[in-house]
Amino acid sequence: MPENPCGIELEEVDESIRLQGDERLLLRALTNLLQNSVLHNPQGCAIRVSVRRDGTNTCLLSVRDDGVGADPQKLASVLNAPYAPKRAHGLGLFLVRRITETHGGQFTARTAPGEGFSGEMRLPCEPLREAAQSG
């Protein structure tokens, strides 16, 4: 199997963030987002990952690529309908959405032909402690 020339860059990672949830499911969601970028860009792409606070009790895990993108209407149908055996793709992002919602969060995905893909998991996290803010 030929190597895919996609590169992954960690843009921003806030190591103070602590999530409450199923580690395996959250890892599965992140893996699905990364695999989506790799699988749909066999010619290669740059993938950027960030994990940051978005408020006191919320974090944002974001995976973005500069790949070929897709039709936004097809993306909406993938996110809103369960996997169907006749479709070759779709289960990965549907699972990301369900895993995010199961953890009390929201999943947002954006794409357009020629403009890449971005997936954002907005999840509840432990509040930022005063000591961590000042120290």
Image: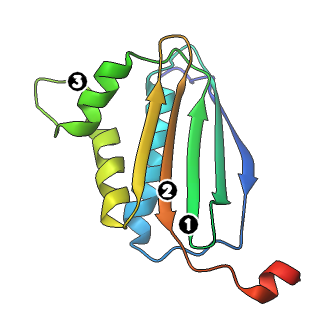
Q: Position of residue 110 (x, y in %)?
A: 47, 30
Q: Name the residue: 87% across, 82% down.
A: 134
Query: How many other residues sit within 10 Å of disc 3, few (<14), some (14-19) or many (≥20)?
Result: few
Q: Quadrant of residue 75?
A: top left
Q: Which residue is mark 3?
A: 88
Instruction: Kindly indicate whether the residue at mark 1 contacts the one at mark 2 (C-beta within 8 angstroms).
Output: yes
Q: Secondary structure at mark 3?
A: loop
Q: Name the residue: 41% across, 74% down.
A: 21
Q: Which residue is mark 2?
A: 122
Q: Which residue is mark 1?
A: 58
Q: In this figure, what is the number of numbered marks?
A: 3
Q: Which amino acid is tagged 1?
A: Thr
Relative placement, left or right, of 42 versus 134 is left
Nearer to us of marks 1 and 3 is: 1
Relative placement, left or right, of 59 versus 121 is right
Q: Earlier in the sequence, mark 3 or mark 2?
A: 3
Q: Is residue 10 above or below residue 15?
A: above
Q: Name the residue: 51% across, 46% down.
A: 120
CA distance for labels 3 and 2 = 27 Å
